[in-house]
Amino acid sequence: MLKIWNLNKFTGVIGAFNCQGGGWCRETRRNKCASRFSNPVTTKTNPKDIEWSSGKNPISIEGVQAFAMYLSQSKKLVLSKPHENIEIALEPFNFELVTVSPVTTFAGKPVQFAPIGLVNMLNTGGAIQSLIYTHDPDSSVQICIKGSGEMRVFASEKPRACKIDGRDVAFEYEDSMVVTQVPCSPPSGLSTADYFF
């Protein structure tokens, strides 16, 4: 199993790839499958597999007690403690991309929140350009998004309302995820999503 990681502005991403049984053939100069070596593989990963303090834009996870981990291929959300492993099983030549987002708890309200991003993109969290939490008097989150498609966030409670570019929008709340549709971006290429709790 090949595992790699990267950082976005507000989330991390882990890629897991089952590459067993494949390789470059020097004679035919093509990728070749050796099916006898192609087997399902299982691995474990956790939020600490990401080097959060690396790169040009490190992300502080000091004091973070939980992470929302969104598995893009299985479309599943898992809440994890920093060192708690999740298991990933992959068939030959398959992959899983895991968006890892630190969970924030609002001051004065027992609501937890973590952005996931545009799930129609491979790197879902890469769409998030800014993230602003407002704790008092109303608990809300504003996310600036580059792109369009299905936006998902983790929320421990259903929001009172959601807005895209200042307009109320319909949303679904399922499996602790808020799902909204972000339409094609305005000329700036950016849209704003607001979540009110």
Image (cartoon, grey):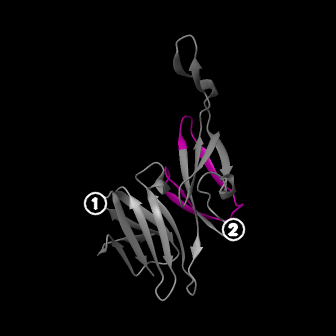
Q: Mark on residue 62?
A: 2
Q: Mark on residue 186?
A: 1
Per the rendered image, the range of residues in magenta is 69-95
Q: Where is 137 relative to 167, above or below?
A: below
Label 1, label 2: how far apart the Cα atoms are: 36 Å
Circle 1: residue type: Pro
Name the residue rendered at 38%, 69% in the picture.
Answer: 193
Q: Mark on residue 60?
A: none
Q: Say whether residue 175 is visible.
A: no
Q: Earlier in the sequence, mark 1 or mark 2?
A: 2
Circle 2: residue type: Glu
| Tag 2 secondary structure | loop
Q: Quadrant of the C terminus?
A: bottom left
Crowding at label 1, few (<14), some or many (≥20) Cα neighbours within 10 Å? few
> Was residue 113 drawn as part of the magenta stretch in this picture?
no
Q: Quadrant of the N terminus?
A: top right
Q: Where is 98 relative to 106, above or below?
A: above
> Was residue 70 drawn as part of the magenta stretch in this picture?
yes
Crowding at label 2, few (<14), some or many (≥20) Cα neighbours within 10 Å? few
